[in-house]
Amino acid sequence: MPLTEARKIAETEYHNKLRDSALCEDPKLHAHLRSNYKWYSIARQRDAFVESYFRQHCAGARTLDFACGDGHNTFLMSKMGADATGIDISDISVGNAQREAARLSLQANFAVMIAKSWSLPMTLLISSM
């Protein structure tokens, strides 16, 4: 069986086990299997905060997304009305971001650049995670 199929099966089994009501009868196992949920919660809270912040501050701003990766936060800033630019050290990530921006018909700029070498005046700065 290919590794990806084995991983899908293992992930399905994990989630099925996690959602099985019988799991509540074993508090130790339940706690163990749900130990990573704190990370999902933090990510959801962070994402909600970032989106709320962008809604309040991006309209009309020039923004720079340091370490933009594939451009997720740059896209959000653009959608919220910013003149958004994303920079990343990875040419692959920048290429992915440029293609996705075109696919989404978003006005966003991307450049391969080491973050500490930028010299653009910006009114809002965000460091991607």
Image (cartoon, rainbow, N blue to C red):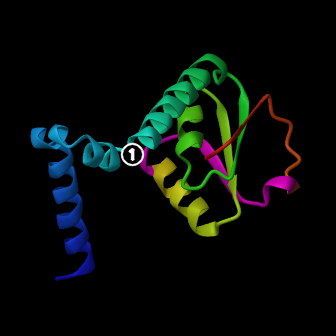
| Image position of 63 with respect to 34: above or below | above
Q: Where on the picture, by quarter, is residue 20? A: top left
Task: Answer left or right for 41 relative to 98.
Answer: left
> Which one is nearer the viewer's eye here, 34 or 39?
34
Pinpoint residue 62: horizontal percent, then vertical percent.
Answer: 73, 32
Furthest residue in direction bottom, as rendered? 1
Pinpoint residue 124: horizontal percent, then vertical percent.
Answer: 75, 30
> Which one is nearer the viewer's eye here, 94 or 23?
23
For the N terminus, give its image quadrant.
Answer: bottom left
Task: Answer left or right for 41 relative to 68.
Answer: left
Q: Residue at x 15, y 50 (%)?
A: 16
Q: Where on the picture, by quarter, is residue 46? A: top right
Q: Residue at x 81, y 34 (%)?
A: 122
Pinpoint residue 41: horizontal percent, then vertical percent.
Answer: 44, 34
| Image position of 37 with respect to 47: above or below | below
Q: Is residue 107 visible?
A: no
Q: Where on the picture, by quarter, is residue 127? A: top right
User: Which segment is the magenta one?
Assistant: 103-116
> Which one is nearer the viewer's eye here, 21 or 56?
21
Pinpoint residue 37: horizontal percent, then vertical percent.
Answer: 38, 41
Q: Residue at x 29, y 45 (%)?
A: 28
**Residue 49 part of the magenta-drawn span:** no
Residue type at mark 1 is Ser
Residue under label 1: 35
Task: Answer left or right for 59 relative to 116.
Answer: left
> Which one is nearer the viewer's eye here, 27 or 115?
27
